[in-house]
Amino acid sequence: MDIDVKKVAMLSRIRLTDDEAAELGPQLASIIGYIEQLSEVDTDGVEPTAHPHDAAMPLRANVVSNSNRRDALQASSPKLESGLYVVPKVIE
Amino acid sequence: MMPYSSLSDIQSRLNSGKSTAVEVAQLYLDRIAAYNDELNAFVHIDAADVLAQAQASDAHRAEHGARALEGLPIAIKDIFCTSNGPTRCCSNILDDFHAPYDAHVISQLKAAGAVLVGKTNMDEFAMGSSTETSAFGVCRNPWDTDRIPGGSSGGSAAAVAAALTPAALGTDTGGSIRQPAALTGITGLKPTYGRVSRRGIIAFASSLDQAGPMTRNVKDAAMITAVIAGHDAGDATSVSDAPAIDWLAACDAQDMKGLKIGKPSEYFVDGMDAEVRESVEAALKQCQDLGAEIIDISLPHTKYAVAAYYVIAPSEASANLSRYDSVRFGHRCDDPEDLLDMYTRSRDEGFGAEVKRRILTGAFTLSSGYYDAYYLKAQKVRTLIQQDFIQAFEQVDVIATPTSPIPAFKLGEKTDDPLTMYLSDIFTIAVNLAGLPGLSQPCGFANNLPVGLQWIGPAWREDTILSAAAAYEHATDWSTKTPAGFNGNGDAS
């Protein structure tokens, strides 16, 4: 299987150097090659399982359960100004 | 007090006034100071904080009496958010992260009076089977420090095995509690998916992740699970109507009269270590002597479990790890040119090689044109794997297998070939795909390295596997073996 590693890396928002891409390409091909064996399994009429148990997601009451903790929640941000997250300019 | 004491031994000493929580905490802090450099089991320790918790516990005992885990030291895998100290998931992308709240299970341990001893080493984001992908460096196996302790909860396993703590919390997505427990000669329990809240546990693969205890014996595992289990309205996958279990009473079993144990042919195969196989076969013979009936069964889709897992887990990981965008938390690269440069360079610098491999694998299997062939197909195979177990449990009460096909391997032995590393989880992965409870306990040695016996139960029947494991432990002495290099009895015979 030929995998366009740079394209997948861009989908994942991870920069790869040419060296990294050259190393990851064959590794991904080997992993995907192993995964290919799933095609041997007859899954006609089999429902997919996304979650191990058939439990319905319970609803909880829509009430305020926590206080305003903005400072604590923002404390780990790499860049803040006046309580706002700062990122590079998006629109010129 | 001896360092190789069980939680229940320590609890008796504390209850009878022979020791205080502060003395117990100091004993383990001293052992950490003496041995952690050699093992690298802990990645964060704050001795003053540990002693303050122990003092508060002694005060609580004096004033209000003892709670369920009063004064008992428990180490915490670095994947659990804790409001005191850093939470890093052993990744450089969380190089300056302090969680603003405690994970639900951490709140429960605190409310039960436990003393949290520190953060333990792990594979970065729990992606690995050897604790070699940690940003803090490799962790070593106390039975042979040239060997890996298993993973991803390798730091928790090594810490318990060398008595740097009497117990620890781990998480298990494809075997990350059971495999390191097996490779270090301790007991580890992965509860049924949904039994324990995942809130505040850094997510790897959300439909597979589950937290559980790593301990010296079966009863200690039950003591901790009794505290951390239960519905949490803050986790939509935490099950609200899970059947209740008497966790401690389940551990009183001393025989296996009438127990039907399934022995799946797919877990006793060519290529596995001969001594591992011998140990597990001998354990099953012993179970027969204890009154159990061994029934040969088949779980025909077992051979596809690793392939299905390495679609589903990386797919979920690639989605979960998209949150590391260097905006709200996490590492940000220097002087980003624009938003895209900030994302791609921060994530390149922050994630290690194995995490990148898994994110890319997941992005590929979820990508347009491949989704049906890989992700949807894997979810259907997951259904068949689950059905294999459901059919088997119509015939038997519990299933017994080796936990790992091989004992602990050498550091660096499998790091060159990711796929070989993935195959070391071949006996643990199906349990996560099916959402079932699994327990590993020591059952012998191969080449002087510990071997694990795995018990698999039907959903919500942790009591069945605890009883089987407790009866086996009562009849044998494998759980009492401890590594000589760390003041243990060294009896690998």
Image (cartoon, rainbow, N blue to C red):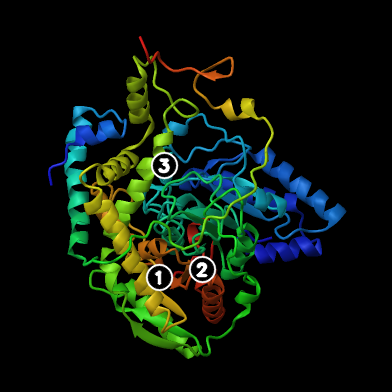
Of circles 2 and 3, the one toward us is 3
Query: Mark 2 — residue?
Result: B481
Task: Same chain for labels 1 and 3? Say yes or no.
Answer: yes
Badge 3: residue crowd in 10 Å (few <14, some 14–19, many ≥20)? some
Amino acid type of the residue tagged 3 in the rendering: Asn
Of circles 1 and 3, the one toward us is 3
Measured as percent of width and height from the top left, residue B72 is found at: 68, 56
Residue A75 visible in the snapshot: no
For marks 2 and 1 on the same chain, the one whose residue lies earlier in the sequence: 1
* Chain identity of mark 1: B
Cα distance, mark 2 to mark 3? Answer: 40 Å
Q: Quadrant of the image for the N terminus of chain B?
A: bottom right
Q: Secondary structure at mark 3?
A: helix
Q: Quadrant of the image for the C terminus of chain B?
A: bottom left
Residue B186 visible in the snapshot: yes
Q: Secondary structure at mark 2?
A: loop
**A62, B460: nearer the viewer:** A62
Query: Mark 3 — residue?
Result: B320
Badge 1: residue crowd in 10 Å (few <14, some 14–19, many ≥20)? many
Residue that sits furthest to the left in the current view: A2
Measured as percent of width and height from the top left, residue B457 is found at: 47, 73
Question: Which residue is at 54% across, 27% downward?
Answer: A76
Cα distance, mark 2 to mark 1? Answer: 10 Å
Asked whether, in this view, residue B120 is left or right of residue B68, the answer is left
Please identify the quarter of the rendering in which residue B278 is found: bottom left
Amino acid type of the residue tagged 2 in the rendering: Lys
* Chain identity of mark 3: B
**B142, B350: nearer the viewer:** B350
Question: Which residue is at 61% across, 65% downward?
Answer: B220
Question: Which residue is at 33% across, 47% downward?
Answer: B315
Query: Mark 1 — residue?
Result: B445
